[in-house]
Amino acid sequence: MIIRDALEADLPAIIDIYNAATATRTSTALLGPVAVEERLPWFHRHSPNQFPLWVAEIDGNIAGWLSFHEFIRRPAYDGAAEISIYVNENFRRRGLGRTLLAKAIADAPRLKTRALVGYVLGHNAASLALFEQAGFERWGRLPRIARFETAERDLVIVGRHV
């Protein structure tokens, strides 16, 4: 497995993984697929030295990705970053998410990040377990804040100081 900064050429694979996750209703609050073109501004907001976007490549395939995002645009929150992890369903249960998350934790000081925050839908037990195994704690819960068709879901906020 190679973890590297994402290239614009990786964006179609990143979006494919994201759209597959969107359809499951367990990983994101979007309700429909996104197009590569509409995600270009999102891609270009990432910076390898502050808010990176990494891909995990296995045998030439983009197997997953992790992105850093600005947490909240207020000076007191400088040094906090939101992270998101998505893994291609064909590469799950191989430790890919754990490896990406470990890299985020290890690289946080270099990125001048003192706290990592994740938003996880409460019914996504696999993601909650992944973060908890990496030393993240549950910092909050927004009950029934997300609505998918007729189902209401909690949003769990996980965090870790680094």
Image (cartoon, rainbow, N blue to C red):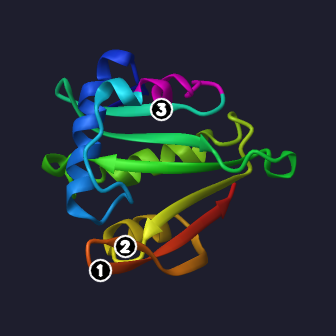
Q: Mark 3 belongs to which amino acid?
A: Leu
- Examine the structure image and report whether residue 41 is included in the region drawn in magenta: yes
The quarter of the rendered structure image containing the N terminus is top left
* Image location (x, y in percent) of residue 128: 42, 71
Residue type, mark 2 in image: Arg
Determine the image quadrant of residue 15.
top left
C-alpha gap between disc 3 and disc 1 = 31 Å
Q: Tell me which numbered mark, 3 or 2, is placed earlier along the sequence.
A: 3
Name which quarter of the figure residue 161 lies in.
Answer: bottom right
Of all residues, the one furthest to the front in this rendering is 149
The label number, if any, that marks residue 53 in the structure image? 3
Q: Are marks 2 and 1 in contact (CB under 8 Å)?
A: yes
Q: Residue at x 40, y 65 (%)?
A: 130
* Residue drawn where x is 39% and y is 18% of the image: 7
Q: Is residue 20 left or right of residue 133?
A: left
Question: In terms of sequence position, does the residue under pointer 3 or pointer 1 come before the other?
Answer: 3
The extreme bottom residue here reads 143
Residue bearing mark 2: 147
Task: Tell me the residue that label 1 is attached to.
Answer: 151
> Circle 3 — which element?
strand
Depth check, front residue: 44 or 118:
44
In the visual, does 72 lie left or right of 121? Answer: right
Quadrant (top left/top right/bottom left/bottom right) for the C terminus: bottom right
* CA–CA distance in space, label 3 to label 2: 28 Å
